[in-house]
Image (cartoon, grey):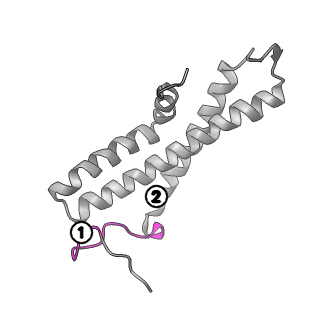
Amino acid sequence: MRHFPSFTGGKPRIMTKLTDIPCWYYDIAVVVSVYQAYRGFMFQWIFSEGHKYGQRELSVTLRVVLLCVAEMFTYLVCAISGFLSFFIAYQLATAAPSPTTSAPLIFLVLYGLLGATAKLPDLLHKIKFPYSE
């Protein structure tokens, strides 16, 4: 079996296989992620009522497919990636804490917090890119 090099030289490996994640962690991540996905779907369902495309009002089918499912998928991916970020941060913090791992650790914890609590999709909607309206 091939082992990938660790980030810390000869010290213990930081990353483990996804199969090493405890079942209870998967259970919590799946339940919260599915809830966040449903929440995203319902936010779009409630707030997109009367949404028009040009002069036409969107039918229920188009509203669900174009707006609600896309938002549901965004919330699901953000929540799952947030939980994965928490797990990586835990592995990083417990494997070999050093001054060089503090910045990635802070980033992973903040990303995990924003992702798991469904604040990341809201933040992504508020980003203003240069030359965008």
Residue 72 is a magenta residue: no
Say which of 92 and 104 sits in front.
Answer: 104
| Amino acid of disc 1 | Thr
* Badge 2 density bin: few <14, some 14–19, many ≥20, Cα 10 Å: few
Q: Is residue 69 left or right of residue 75?
A: right
Q: Can residue 35 be seen in this view?
A: no
Residue bearing mark 1: 8
- Position of the C terminus, as image quadrant, is top right
In-front residue for pair 24/18: 18
* Residue 89 point in image, percent of width and height: 32, 54
Q: Name the residue under label 2.
A: 24
Say above or below: 132 vs 76: above
Q: Specify the segment rendered in magenta.
A: 7-19
The image quarter containing residue 44 is: top right
Q: What type of secondary structure mainly makes up the magenta span? A: loop
Please tell me which residue is depicted at 23% across the width and 56% down the height of the picture.
Answer: 101
Q: Quadrant of residue 66?
A: top right
In this rendered view, identify the residue nearer to me: 123 or 115. Answer: 123
